[in-house]
Image: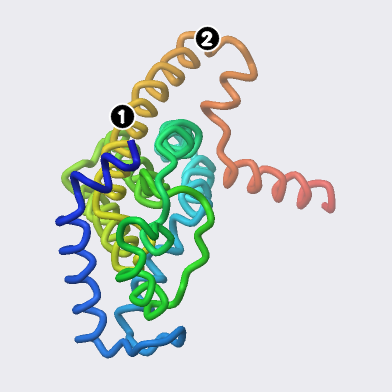
Amino acid sequence: MAQWLDTVFSAMDLGVFTLMHNMAVAAGESAGPEITSFLTYLMHFISFFAHDGLCMFALGVILMIPRRTRKLGVCVFLAVCCGGIITNLTLKPLVARMRPYANMEHLAATVKDWWIAVGQPLESDRSFPSGHTTSATAAMVGLFLASRRKKYIWPVLIFPFMMATSRVYLMVHYTSDVLAGLISGFLGGLAAFFITRWLFGFLERHRNVRLFAFALDFEPIAFLKGLKRSKAKDEN
């Protein structure tokens, strides 16, 4: 599978890598491990937000805290989990594609120097699909689908494409890797949406169970205010 991808997408991979390298040079990036371009710093910054899915998981957890955004948070969290299952646990080990800068039989001779020029980000796992792109796409698709205000929240769907661009710019993924990551992330977000809808429907139908009612209705701010009032009452 990895060899097939290298063969079929060879011209596209080299063309896009060349374009990204030219962008880096035009933005002021110089040869060597020291970053000299704001554009490269920006791409590292974008890429950081999906490292191991941690920021995406954190977004889900934060959204889970208030009652009014709890469903969004659960959907985002589950979306990242579903995307990770598709990409990191299934496709990456199955395809076992090498990173562009390490694939000596394909593009490494060209891409390795360009990879060094944009800061040599440490990437040790397999290349296909892009885990960063999967994580970002899954989280944002889950957030969009679970939201009731889609006409206001649609700009979040731009973020996965920014993530995909950053991964190719940094020479750690082929274009086909990030395209597959977009698809995997979309499927993860879609699966999470249906799981979340079923889960909250189940909790609503069994609201008479105290634990389920707590999961639906718990409001941290109201809880803290109640503690504060209780403490003030005891002091008086």
x and y, in percent, of residue 153 in the image: 24, 48
Chain-order first, disc 1 or disc 2: 1
x and y, in percent, of residue 148 in the image: 26, 36
Instruction: Kindly tell me whether residue 75 is visible in this rendering.
Output: no
Q: Which residue is mark 1?
A: 190
Dot 1: within a 10 Å radius of its alpha carbon, few (fewer than 14), some, or many (20 or more) residues? many
Q: Nearer the viewer, residue 145 or 230?
A: 145
Amino acid residing under circle 1: Leu
Name the residue rendered at 65%, 47% in the picture.
Answer: 224
Is 12 situated left or right of 196 in this image? left
Residue 39 vs 135, above or below: the answer is below
Instruction: Tell me where residue 210 sits by quadrant.
Output: top right
Is 163 situated left or right of 201 in this image? left
Residue 144 vs 175, above or below: the answer is above
On residue 206, which mark appears? Answer: 2
Is 121 situated left or right of 7 in this image? right
Amino acid residing under circle 2: His
Counting every numbered tag in the picture gives: 2
Residue 27 vs 70, above or below: the answer is below
